[in-house]
Amino acid sequence: MSFPWIGAINVIPSSGEFTYDTVPYTARQPGASAFLPINTYYAPGGTKTDFEYALDQLQADLPNCQFVALVIQWMGNSLDASACQVYPSTTYWLGTQVGAFAPADGTSDAGLAPSYWRVSGLTLADCNNGLIPISRPDGVNSAYGGTCSDQSVVRAIQAVKARGLKVALYVQMNMDVTGQPWRGMCVYSSDMSTAADAAVAHFLGTATTAMFTRDAANLTVNYSNSGLPSNGKYDFTFRRFILHYANLAVVAGGVNLFCINGELRGLEMIRGSTWTPQGTVDGSGKNHWNYPFVTGLVTLANDIRIIFDGAGLAKNLAARQNLITYSPDWSQWTGAPHSGTYGGQPYNGVWPHLDDLYSAANIDLVSFDNYFPLSDWTTGDGGLDALNWRGTPPSSWPVASPNTIGLGLAGAPDIHSIAYLQSQIEGGEKFNYWYGDYNSSKAYDPNGTLQIVTAPQGDRLTQSRNAYAAGQELLALKKVRWWWSNQHKAVYDNGDGQGWIPRGNPTSWVPYAKSIMHMEYGSPCNDKCTNEPNLFFDLGSVAGGTQFWTVWRPDGSAPKIDNAQCINYHQAFNAYWQANNWTVGSVPMMATDMMFAWNWDARPFPTFPLRLDIWADGKNWANSHWLNGKFPGVASPAQPSPPAMPALATFPSLPGLAWSAVMRPKFATQTHDHASGKSSRRAKMVYPLYEIELTYEFLRADSAGELQALLGFFKQQQGQTQPFWFAFPNLSNVTGAQIGTGDGSTKTFFVSYPFGQMATPAPGKIAIAAVYVNGIAQASGAWSKSTGGPAAVTLSTAPALGAIVSIDATITWICRFSDDTEDLEQFTYNLFDLKSLKLQTVKDWGSVAFAA
């Protein structure tokens, strides 16, 4: 089934020497003798490449997608800006051994030399000279794929345009550093100094527009810097990186959008030697601060415009042709946080460090990578958002009491609700409130659901939401509408007792001047992924992680997968901005055609992710942001199955059990006290656990062995540790239990257990003997019972509106012994003296199996 909501998307993996090529290629690994295909894995032996098949799938699954961004990477080798080099490299290089590439048909590739891989004048001949190798953390496998060969990038751009799609070239620096950290971690520690100025100058480098020569015949660009050794062949700097691809875009005939990297948060924040909290005011009364890397980005945008204009590739904003942008990280797109002392005066606040870039003449759209949280959902009953689901939304900002703000939603509280997710786009965390604690740990659920979760800490654990104050809109990162339509000032505390307030003159940003786009937005596919969609699950990266309150698989190996929530996120995001955009004059606030989803893979599904022998990152596909193969109606490849339900023992049925067996529900309540003196309460568990007390009139220890059976069973279960099956006397058999009401279309009804007016999910094993519609038994072939997940009955024909669906069934509970401190001696005492024992139901077998 196609998904209509996405209009623009990023294509990765950003690496692989010929992954994006439309020409079939072969390669010989270092030390090997045979050439093998490297970009026709989907249809081996054919002439159509993987990239072309991936584009076929993209257009089939995303019929309204009109904009494709090709992501291309070079690598950085240090988190210290003063030492970091930015460079291309190849995986076909091991020690002193170098591999080879060749077109699959044996012909030459547009006249290129036998060393077919080339990037910015570099070839495989440079492998044992000045080229920097890609690291191999395990000594065998490369940390990243090789840089895409120039001619493959040109052909990819042309292939996308040939399909009638717009194309963006999105170049990224990724860090080839131990632990594969995020590029935003590259920084210089001692800023506000001349050394900081020098560090940024080193990182940017001295490449100029005149140092590049385009080679249209061979689809490449050469570089020569005569002021450096070897004519700068190994001059690995950021400016060379960016200007190389600006020229390569010209070779390809132009692009609709060129993005100068993104998410270089640490570099953006570096303050030059003349930075002060007050900044400087220009002749127009606009405030500026000294951020040398931001100044470097402005210069790069100017240089790219010179390259495009010089090649006759004029800017056309309306037609989306030859546009330029830079896309910072969502976490500080409005400003950089700083604290310290200047001139004996303390300061602590946020400075709109990127406004000079957003205002620059050759930055055509304001962009940031949008990974805002779209939920604040806990385990158990969902937390405060569920509690306030139907409440009246706030009518003004700031909100004084964010713990009690209503969402104004109908229906049952559910994190999967599209309306709920949309209510958080201009609401919720980072809009009406903030949390200060971003720490989390994998642990047993503090809300008592008996599951393994990514448990938050501090104020986020207790949902103690912090309110913004008047004048602090710049701090509320989701207030995009306010940001676009207002002037900006630094917001900081200078020790004068007024706290964090706007200070000084406004920046150079002009309200309504340019549209806002998103070079990236997206969500992983974990349980509760929308709580923290910027994180991806990758145990090999220090930047990887899982979302707050994510529930893990019972064996603790990985988070539970929730593809539906990821898809809901994309629908909510796109539909909301299509319906809630602004236009002032002729300028729309949101460039809704340029919201690029993250991501689609150039390696076609299901070859990727199944071929782990070729691509190690396939192991991250199920939990991460990939969209290939995850839309409804698309068959997913084989995934690791959750552990099978363990073979649980059955509690012994003994003749001495009296009729005074008791079942008591157990709820847990959380209380929130407010400054007004009022308090609110919510249940931590939507459905209760049950405590069961069994009283025995007699237990024989003779040949009948009743006492021995119970004592042996207690020892076998290791006391309270192991769960077991238990059939409650006179409650296990249910007759005519209602499980739903027909609406004329619904065929599937989840099985619940009736306790008077309350129905709870059916616990344990369910054996369904009969199904009724309005009291009429249905033939055995007219219904079926689910074989996995929550117990459900599916009828072949949807019951009519108002028809009562009911069942006869036998239900067996999963229980454990109740007392967590009880030993065999205490257990025996209770049997002899009190003639009773206590059990407790458990919510799901998986969490208990893990605990065991």
Image (spheres, grey):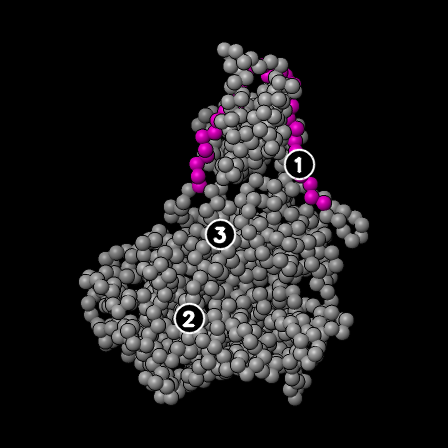
* Residue 23 percent across, percent down from the top left: 28, 66
As drawn, the label of residue 525 is: 3
Task: Look at label 3 and name its amino acid.
Answer: Cys
State yes or no: discs 2 and 1 in contact (Cβ < 8 Å): no
Task: Look at label 2 and name its amino acid.
Answer: Asn
Residue for point 48% across, 58% down: 544
Q: Earlier in the sequence, mark 3 or mark 2?
A: 2
Q: Foreground residue, 839 or 190?
A: 190
Q: Residue furthest right?
A: 677
Dominant secondary structure of the residues highlighted in magenta in the image: loop
Q: Is residue 658 magenta?
A: yes
Span highlighted in magenta in the image: 642-671
Label 3 vs label 2, nearer the camera:
2
Q: Dot 3 lies on which element?
A: loop
As drawn, the label of residue 77 is: 2
Query: Neighbour class for label 3 at 10 Å: few (<14), some, many (≥20)?
Result: many
Visible residue check, residue 784 = no
Q: Is residue 676 magenta?
A: no
Query: Residue 806 vs residue 649: left or right?
Result: right
Label 2 vs label 1, nearer the camera:
2
State yes or no: discs 1 and 3 in contact (Cβ < 8 Å): no
Residue for point 51% across, 58% down: 535
Q: Earlier in the sequence, mark 2 or mark 1?
A: 2
Q: Residue furthest front?
A: 825
From this view, report whether residue 450 is shown above or below residue 773.
below
Task: Look at label 1 and name its amino acid.
Answer: Phe
